[in-house]
Image (spheres, helix red, strand yellow):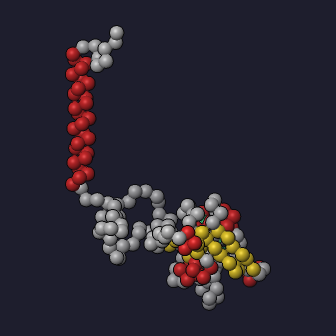
């Protein structure tokens, strides 16, 4: 019958030593993590700084950018490309007008369905839509997650250009 812990005393000692070493390594890693500074923002309960800003490129909410050549107007030409590319079908646009006069009369984004993939921003031919670093968006009322044309226009009023996409990765941005 095959022995469970090796064929001889030497095998048993080797297995015990390997087990002890792995416990020591685990304890060492645990100890290091106990004393090193944290990298997480313990939001909203502790350490939350009122001036906290997510790192550049954070995708929190949406905005439609203004057209500097048409006061009160939007850059959006209602081409529907963002609506068509959205994998979650959370963008709904009602266009009006033809040619240079084409514009949205309704623009609705259901951020509750959104997976924040950035495709709508990427596909826009006139850089009319962007995502913003707003992160205080949690609510227990789904209808409050819907952004309409006026909300999107207001959010984009002071945004000169769509924000840049930062490389995805784990960044310790000093949030602890
Ligand atoms: S970020 Fe992605 S899922 Fe969200 S609205 Fe844009 S295309 Fe749709
Ligand atoms: S935001 Fe851009 S992609 Fe979407 S309808 Fe307007 S112009 Fe087209």
Q: Which residue is painted at 51% across and 83% down in the image? A: 158
* The quadrant where residue 113 appears: bottom right
Residue 117 x, y percent position in the rendering:
56, 61
- Name the one closer to the observer, 6 or 65: 6
Image quarter where the N terminus lies is top left
Q: Is residue 83 left or right of residue 7?
A: right
- Name the one closer to the observer, 148 or 123: 148
Q: Which residue is painted at 22% across and 44% down in the image? A: 28
In this view, the residue farthest toward the front is 140
Q: Is residue 149 above or below residue 176?
A: below
Residue 44 x, y percent position in the rendering:
36, 68
Q: Is residue 58 above or below residue 77?
A: above
Q: Which residue is painted at 34% across and 76% down in the image? A: 50
In this view, the residue farthest toward the right is 98
Residue 51 x, y percent position in the rendering:
35, 76
Ligand 1 - quadrant of the structure image: bottom right
In this view, the residue farthest toward the top is 1
* The quadrant where residue 45 appears: bottom left
């Amino acid at each position: 019958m095959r022995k469970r812990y090796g064929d001889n005393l030497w095998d048993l000692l080797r297995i015990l030593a390997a087990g002890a070493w792995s416990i020591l390594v685990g304890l060492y890693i645990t100890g290091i993590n106990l004393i090193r500074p944290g990298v997480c923002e313990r939001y909203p309960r502790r350490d939350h700084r009122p001036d906290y800003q997510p790192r550049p490129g954070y995708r929190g909410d949406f905005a439609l950018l203004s057209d500097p050549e048409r006061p009160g107007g939007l850059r959006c030409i209602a081409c529907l490309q963002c609506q068509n590319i959205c994998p979650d079908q959370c963008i709904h646009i009602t266009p009006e007008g033809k040619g240079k006069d084409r514009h949205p009369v309704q623009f609705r984004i259901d951020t509750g369905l959104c997976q924040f993939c950035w495709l709508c921003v990427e596909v826009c031919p006139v850089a009319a839509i962007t995502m913003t670093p707003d992160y205080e968006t949690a609510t227990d009322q789904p209808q409050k997650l819907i952004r309409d044309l006026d909300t999107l226009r207001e959010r984009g009023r002071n945004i000169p250009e769509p924000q840049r996409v930062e490389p995805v990765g784990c960044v310790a941005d000093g949030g602890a």
